Image (tube, rainbow, N blue to C red):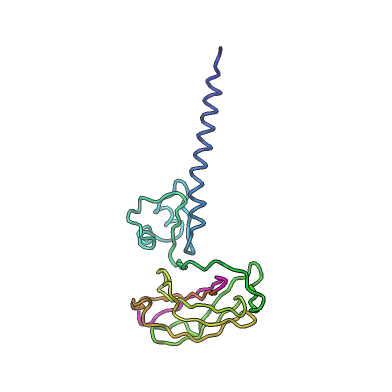
């Protein structure tokens, strides 16, 4: 009996290629779902921290510091790399359908909340005005603050309620500390997030007393 060795080799190579593709793409899918910062980069096959930094206008030591990487040479395919200016968002509550009786209405598909301030400079103890648009209507929102590049705390530093048209206008006093840790650094980032829906907007201002 004659065995077609070439055909056997071809089938073996094909199987190995399929397995490699499955193994290589699965981590990327998981990592993308776990992304908690924006902007960010998902590591592709053949990339290293140096190439990622070069492509994003920064340096690998900065990426190492932002992402708390013990060894900059050990990054894996599918890993989420936070880029400079990233905002690390705390886990949002699971979105729930708004009760009809509350008058809570979500923004149209593709429309996202945004916030702004009445000043571009403020420090601990200062009171600023936070305005916002495109939020869910009549919803309590929590206000978080942290230095840019640092994760937001799990406990809010303030709260407010959006208007029936989805706008926001509230006064917010910048705290001296967040979770018992003195609020230092510049710029400072503010996150406003719906307590029920998880819709959020963020922006930053400069701290003249870092």
Q: Residue at horizontal 45%, vertical 53%? A: 79
Q: Position of residue 89 (x, y in %)?
A: 47, 68
In this view, 172 is above or below 150? below
Q: Is residue 60 left or right of residue 110?
A: left
Q: Nearer the viewer, residue 111 or 157?
A: 157
In this view, 200 is above or below 74? below
Q: Is residue 45 left or right of residue 64?
A: right
Which image quadrant is residue 70 in? bottom left
In this view, 106 is above or below 121? above
Q: Residue at horizontal 48%, vertical 78%? A: 143
Which image quadrant is residue 113 in? bottom right
Q: Residue at horizontal 66%, vertical 70%? A: 108
Q: Which residues are magenta?
A: 196-210
Q: Position of residue 180 (x, y in %)?
A: 34, 77
Q: Position of residue 161 (x, y in %)?
A: 56, 82
Quarter holding the C terminus is bottom left
Q: Position of residue 160 (x, y in %)?
A: 53, 82
Q: Nearer the viewer, residue 3 or 82?
A: 3
């Amino acid at each position: 009996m004659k065995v077609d060795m070439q055909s056997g080799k071809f089938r073996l190579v094909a199987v190995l290629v399929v397995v490699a593709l499955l193994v290589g793409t699965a981590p990327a899918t998981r990592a993308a779902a776990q992304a908690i910062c924006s902007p960010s980069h998902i590591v592709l096959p053949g990339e290293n921290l140096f190439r990622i930094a070069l492509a994003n206008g920064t340096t690998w030591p900065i990426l190492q510091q932002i992402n708390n990487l013990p060894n900059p040479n050990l990054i894996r395919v599918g890993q989420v790399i936070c880029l400079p200016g990233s905002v690390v968002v705390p886990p949002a509550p699971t979105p729930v359908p708004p009760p009809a009786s509350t008058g809570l209405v979500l923004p149209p598909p593709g429309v996202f909340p945004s916030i702004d301030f009445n000043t571009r400079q403020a420090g601990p103890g200062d009171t600023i005005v936070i305005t916002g648009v495109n939020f869910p209507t009549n919803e309590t929102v929590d206000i978080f603050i942290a230095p840019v590049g640092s994760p937001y705390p799990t406990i809010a530093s303030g709260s407010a309620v959006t208007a029936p048209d989805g706008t926001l206008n509230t006064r917010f006093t910048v705290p001296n500390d967040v979770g018992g840790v003195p609020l230092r650094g510049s710029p400072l980032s503010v996150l406003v997030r719906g307590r029920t829906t998880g819709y959020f907007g963020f922006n930053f201002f400069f701290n003249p007393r870092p």
